[in-house]
Amino acid sequence: MVTKRTPGVYVEEISYVPPAIAAVETAIPAFIGYTDLENDKLEAKKIGSLLDFEDAYCDWENWKLTYDVKENAIKEDFSRNELYYHMQLYFANGGGRCYVISLGKKNKNTGGNKADFMAALDVLYKEDEPTLILFPEASQLPYQSCMDVYQAALAQASDLMDRFVILDVPEADDEIDTFRNGIGANNLRFGAAYYPYLKTSISKYGLLNSEDFEFKNLPAEDNKIQKAENLSKEDDEGKKTKNPKAKKEYGNLESKEMIRFIKSQTLTLPPSAAIAGVYASVDGSRGVWKAPANVSLKLVRGLVRKITEEEQAGLNVDAEGGKSINAIRPFTGQGILVWGARTLDGNDNEWRYVNVRRFYNFVEVSVKKATRKFVFEANDANTWVRVSTMIENFLSNLWRQGALAGATANEAYFVKVGLGETMTYDDILNGIMIVEIGLAAIRPAEFIVLRFSHKIQES
């Protein structure tokens, strides 16, 4: 209280509102991949929409295609901006704000470079907001390089404990066993793998018009060319010349057919970007504590292979290594659904489920950031009460939203702090305040058993 020296009336404001915990965002993915442009290379850039990505990373002026009629093939003379297609999948499936770390242009005829992804992970390590890590193009790297990138991302998630990794199972011989052997045994609780690849309804390029094409090797026997030749006219010396108007009409007709053909060539993509969109959608509509499964995927028309019940049993429960892989499966009348919700650490009773691991990330980060205000406060009973009350209020709200199991608050969570309870005199002398928090996290009903029996007629 300020010493008062002059007679008069003084106003003092006293706050009885306890400190509160602000819930952090739970689904802010960081996409790592190659783009058209070199600007913002290896910089974490936040975007909010597909249009933002197009403006920042798409080089529309140089998106020219060559169509070879003889080979019936599309040829490209520029960097493949594959990340653009993955971003379409992400936003179509409910994605929102995210980060992009561009690796710049990809060298032609390569699947990318391991060093590029490792450098991007170093950049991402310094960012506080992202909560998901994915890199769909990493699956194109040589297999061991891909596994090295995956392991580095899992290690980062384990070290920071504020993010989660979404992994694709790269296509390979015996791909499931190869993946399980290659991913290693460390930090598995901080990531989840999804399988198989998706047949999407995304065309190879989003913006097409007749000026986007150069025509090469058009065969002379082509009926439309013959039609154009038949419309030729004779000059004053009796020589035939092509009718420019007819040629123009032919060219326009051919261009339209080329556009239709190219638009029909839809892409097969790994599922991680779509899964990131599902995480964001479920977090927003239900909460991070809801398992991101039993959700249909958009812009997906099929799968590279259909998984049977028996096959999924081997994916979901790995008796030897415990490395669960989440299946994506089609169901009649429901579409193509995400049909798994396990982390890679599928045999761990504590961290088996994706939503449990991500919910703990959410609570831990939210509480950690809120308790910073108490650093250098007196390590005494007054501070302990304020801290415990703040955390209990936060957890109570989560329990009321259905995030925690238990009929009462005492069954759903506990918060402990104090001398003789969580701390010793030695802890206090060393400036250490220890808070213990227990959570009864919601686990999904992964296996629903319906039991039927005959009821005996009683009369």
Image: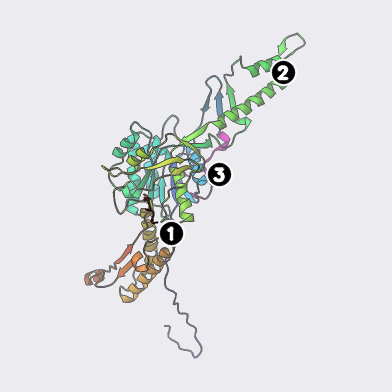
Q: How is the image coloured?
A: rainbow
Could you tell me which quadrant the C terminus lies in?
bottom left
Task: Assess disc 3: are there few (<14), some (14-19) or many (≥20) residues with their C-alpha within 10 Å of its C-alpha.
Answer: few
Q: Is residue 389 above or below residue 7?
A: above
Residue at the spot x=35%, y=38% of the render? 310
Residue 244 covered by magenta stretch: no
- Can you identify the residue that label 2 sits on? 243
Q: Nearer the viewer, residue 453 or 141?
A: 453
Q: Nearer the viewer, residue 40 or 71?
A: 71
Q: Give me the C-alpha separation between circle 2 and circle 1.
A: 68 Å
- Foreground disc of the pair 2, 1: 1
Answer with left or right where residue 154 lies relative to residue 84.
left
Q: Is residue 91 above or below residue 427?
A: above
Residue 317 % position (x, y): 31, 44
- Can you identify the residue that label 3 sits on? 55
- Can you identify the residue that label 1 sits on? 24
